Image (cartoon, grey):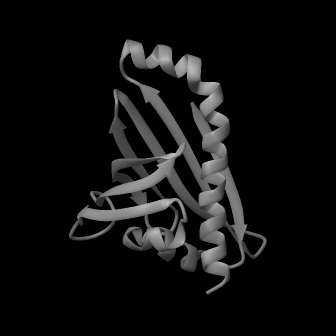
Amino acid sequence: MEINVSTEINCAKEQVWKAITDIGNCKNMIDAIIDLTVLERPETGLVGLKWTETREMFGKEASETMWITEAVEGQYYCTRAENCGAVYLTKMAVAEDNGKTVLMMSFSSESMSFIGKVFSALMGLLMKKSLVKMLEKDLQDIKQYLENK
């Protein structure tokens, strides 16, 4: 499953980048995040930053441990999480377009087990619509946080 969402934010690209890379502050920006604990910080840069995030998903609390696997300063970073036989990859990117900043998020998941692949095939379409709404809400929360500063 792959999902791509984006939003325009009326702030400088540098401000948006600073906000989305301040992982420890994300629970103050994104309503769905209930708790966030940074587990590991790299000496420099973003790659290797690891945290556990708890959110409400589908009416229940769910915690995931995520880490940044790739980053280009001021442009994008990629995260990875693994749970229940699946790998989840997310990319957050910023770009300028006609004087505005575009914040983009892509999310993909891949089941690593046979049972997970069967379940994913059956439930994928139902879950995709909910995940799109959740990711769009995350971007809107970031937009609102930055534009109301």
Residue toward you, 23 or 99? 23
Image quarter hosting the C terminus: bottom right
Q: Is residue 12 visible?
A: no
Rendered location of residue 21, percent (x, y)? 44, 69
In this image, 8 relative to 33: left or right? right
Give the residue drawn at x 65%, y 71%: 143
Relative to 18, residue 93 above or below = above
Image quarter hosting the N terminus: top right
In this image, 137 relative to 53: left or right? right
Residue toward you, 106 or 143? 143
Which residue occupies the extreme front position in the image? 59
In this image, 69 relative to 129: left or right? left
Relative to 146, residue 53 above or below = above
Residue toward you, 126 or 65? 126
Rendered location of residue 82, percent (x, y)? 34, 38
Rendered location of residue 116, percent (x, y)? 42, 20
Give the residue drawn at x 52%, y 63%: 75
Relative to 91, residue 127 above or below = above
Give the residue drawn at x 34%, y 27%: 85
Relative to 89, residue 93 above or below = below
Give the residue drawn at x 43%, y 62%: 34
